[in-house]
Amino acid sequence: MGRARRVDAGGLAYHVLNRGNGHMTIFEDDEDYAAFERVLAEAVERVPGIRLCAYCLMPNHWHLVVWPREDGQLSKFVGWLTLTHTQRWHAHRHSVGGGHVYQGRFKSFPIQRDDHFLTVCRYVERNALRAGLVRRAEDWAWSSLWLWAHPGDHAEVPTLSRWPIDRTRRWVHHVNQPQTGAELEALRRSVNRGSPYGGPSWIQRTAQQLNLQSTLRPRGRPKKNKKGS
């Protein structure tokens, strides 16, 4: 199966994900997390058109929600971020030339900038809670929700941008509430396939505009009808 088409259009919001190579642990201690946040902050500064809206760092992967202004900025931003983090990760461990840190290309999908945007940000910011790493989502220090709930507690953190839609009232409480099975299924489908996430008409229109129709089709070969059926 060929690689999914890379979408890099400006003006759209995106969920971005990358994992450690072979699901290996990327962040082993607080310094590893803090080091990545420093690189993330630098990446935001280096690509001024990038708006970082949400993020969550997990032991073997990370999630970002970004909103680039211009075409090409998504790949430029994530490419510099992953390359620079890989170089510094190896330098810190004195393991330069020791192999890949990441599994390969990052995954991404475009998001409709309405309530679906809030659903994705909530999915990202409750990651550590869903994984059982904390009792409440805002207790996970390596996420945008921590910055929202505990402003000023980190010395070097990436600058977060204003969202295209206002947060739900009592946002922290909302993030701590479980998401529905249907929401999680749709989100994971978009993560795995790179398909647009939004309302039905927006999905169809965006898929056509970005040539992503293949991400909406069922996988596998169609079943053959048996004779007489």
Image (spheres, helix red, strand yellow):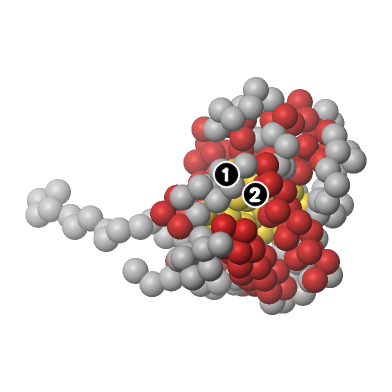
Q: CA distance from mark 1 to mark 2?
A: 6 Å
Compared with residue 166, is residue 209 higher up or lower down, i.e. above or below? Answer: below
Instruction: Tell me: 3 left or right of 54.
Output: left
Q: Nearer the viewer, residue 34 or 162?
A: 34
> Can you see residue 125?
yes
* The label number, if any, that marks residue 32 in the structure image: 2
**For the point 50% across and 41% down, which residue is it?**
185
Instruction: Provide the residue designation for mark 1.
Output: 28
Label 1 residue SS: loop
The residue carrying pointer 2 sits among few (fewer than 14), some (14 to 19) or many (20 or more) residues within 10 Å by Cα, namely: some
Instruction: Tell me: 119 left or right of 186.
Output: right
Residue 207, image x, y percentages: 57, 65
Toward which corner of the image does residue 128 lie, by quadrant?
A: top right
The residue sitting at the front extreme is: 94
Q: Nearer the viewer, residue 153 or 48?
A: 153
Toward which corner of the image does residue 56 lie, by quadrant?
A: top right
Compared with residue 126, is residue 69 higher up or lower down, i.e. above or below? Answer: below
> Can you see residue 215?
no
**For the point 59% across and 30% down, which residue is it?**
133
Toward which corner of the image does residue 227 lie, by quadrant?
A: bottom left
Q: Amino acid at mark 1?
A: Glu
**For the point 83% across and 43% down, which residue is it?**
154
The residue sitting at the bottom extreme is: 72
The residue carrying pointer 1 sits among few (fewer than 14), some (14 to 19) or many (20 or more) residues within 10 Å by Cα, namely: few
